[in-house]
Image (spheres, rainbow, N blue to C red):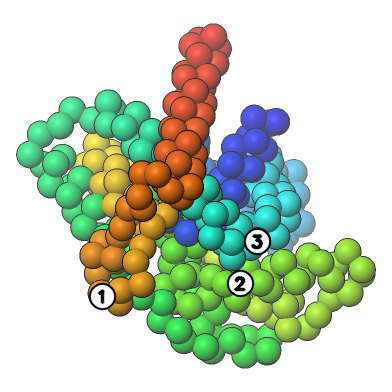
């Protein structure tokens, strides 16, 4: 289960970055369908066992070990890296390095998935549909909706958490990007960072706790409901769904492009720029994009090697 924990770490890192989906990492690492099937075991029957105190039946029915190690990895990433990413996003060169690395990683991952589809007109149509959907979602500006009430129940935050986790489960559509669109991402990262800092001093601030509680409730609702929908389509239309997912991942590359002008065009692609080839920004972009591409390519080969050795 150490391998599952490590994959959870990678998914958690991806979920912290707008434009990268934890679902993409799960798909690349070969645990996407396993994740959806494991979540599916958390159904009415599982709850019935739990409420009746039939713990042995509950643990034998639910894929609890896989989910436990995976989500422990995700949570560990949030705890370790949230402060680091918060710092990097507020630093220009840090943001260039981070986004360039993930752009290279995403291109490497998407190219490796292209080999899994026998392309025809139908599959290309679903690929274009995925690209279009991601482009549409990531082209929206931050909604700047400030509805963060310091109360135990905040419908807006619950809905935001639900939409974010639904986006995260779809490879290519980033949960963080959805929070950016809703105007919740920076407040969420700030509240998580403050909550963890206060926790070190055994202090729990009501504002941060309520904010994160509402987001988590929304995420739990979303993950239980939406995973079943995706699994339904994956089982019945696997190749079409994979083509659609590859399109989502291609489209997500726009949202993690490191350089944008200060223009205010409604379409984000019209604001994309490229710095001078002699600038430090361009050199960092090339170096970290190549590093991301190389490392994810290496990771994929290691995963295939391990699978071959097991067989």
Q: Residue furthest left?
A: 121
Residue 136 position, x and y percent, is: 26, 65
Query: Which circle's residue, 2 or 3, is located before the other in the chain?
Result: 3
Give the residue at x 48% y 70%: 179
Residue 112 % position (x, y): 34, 29
Instruction: Identify which residue, 27 or 236, lies in the foreground.
Output: 27
Element assignment for label 2? helix
Viewport quadrant of the N terminus: top right
Q: Is 164 rendered above or below residue 278? A: below
- In the rendered view, would you say 119 is above or below 226? above
Residue 69 is left or right of residue 290, and the answer is: right
Q: CA distance from mark 2 to mark 3?
A: 14 Å
Which residue lies under the disc numbered 2?
188
User: In terms of sequence position, does the residue under pointer 3 or pointer 1 come before the other?
Assistant: 3
| Residue 268 in picture, x, y percent from top left | 29, 66
- Seen at 58% across and 41% down, the residue is 10
Residue 59 picture quarter? top right
The span from disc 3 to disc 1 (Cα, nearest Å) is 27 Å
Q: Is residue 131 above or below residue 288?
A: below
Mark 2 and mark 1 residues within 8 Å of each other at the beta carbon: no
Q: Secondary structure at mark 3?
A: helix
Cα–Cα gap, marks 2 and 1: 25 Å
For label 3, the residue is: 87
User: Which mark identifies residue 266?
Assistant: 1
């Amino acid at each position: 289960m150490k391998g599952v924990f490590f994959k959870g770490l990678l998914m958690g890192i991806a979920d912290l970055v707008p434009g990268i989906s934890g679902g993409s990492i799960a798909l690349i690492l070969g645990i996407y369908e396993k994740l959806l099937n494991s979540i599916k075991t958390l159904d009415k029957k599982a709850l019935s066992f739990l409420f009746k105190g039939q713990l042995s039946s509950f643990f034998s029915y639910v894929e609890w070990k896989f989910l436990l190690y995976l989500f422990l990895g995700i949570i560990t990433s949030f705890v370790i890296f949230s402060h680091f990413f918060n710092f990097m996003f507020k630093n220009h060169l840090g943001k260039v390095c981070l986004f360039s690395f993930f752009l290279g990683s995403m291109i490497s991952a998407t190219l490796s998935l292209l080999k899994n589809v026998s392309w025809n007109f139908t599959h290309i149509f679903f690929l274009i549909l995925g690209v279009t959907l991601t482009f549409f979602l990531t082209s929206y500006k931050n909604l700047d909706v400030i509805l963060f009430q310091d109360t135990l129940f905040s419908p807006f935050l619950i809905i935001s958490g639900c939409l974010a986790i639904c986006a995260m489960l779809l490879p290519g559509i980033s949960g963080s990007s959805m929070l950016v669109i809703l105007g919740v991402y920076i407040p969420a990262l700030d509240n998580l960072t403050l909550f963890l800092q206060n926790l070190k001093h055994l202090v729990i601030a009501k504002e941060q706790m309520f904010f994160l509680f509402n987001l988590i409730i929304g995420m739990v609702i979303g993950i239980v409901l939406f995973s079943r929908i995706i699994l339904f389509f994956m089982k019945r239309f696997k190749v079409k769904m994979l083509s659609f997912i590859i399109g989502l991942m291609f489209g997500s590359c726009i949202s993690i492009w490191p350089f944008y002008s200060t223009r205010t065009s409604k379409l984000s692609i019209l604001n994309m720029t490229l710095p001078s080839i002699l600038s430090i920004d361009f050199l960092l972009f090339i170096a970290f994009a190549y590093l991301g591409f190389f490392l994810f390519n290496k990771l994929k080969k290691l995963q295939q090697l391990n699978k071959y050795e097991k067989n």
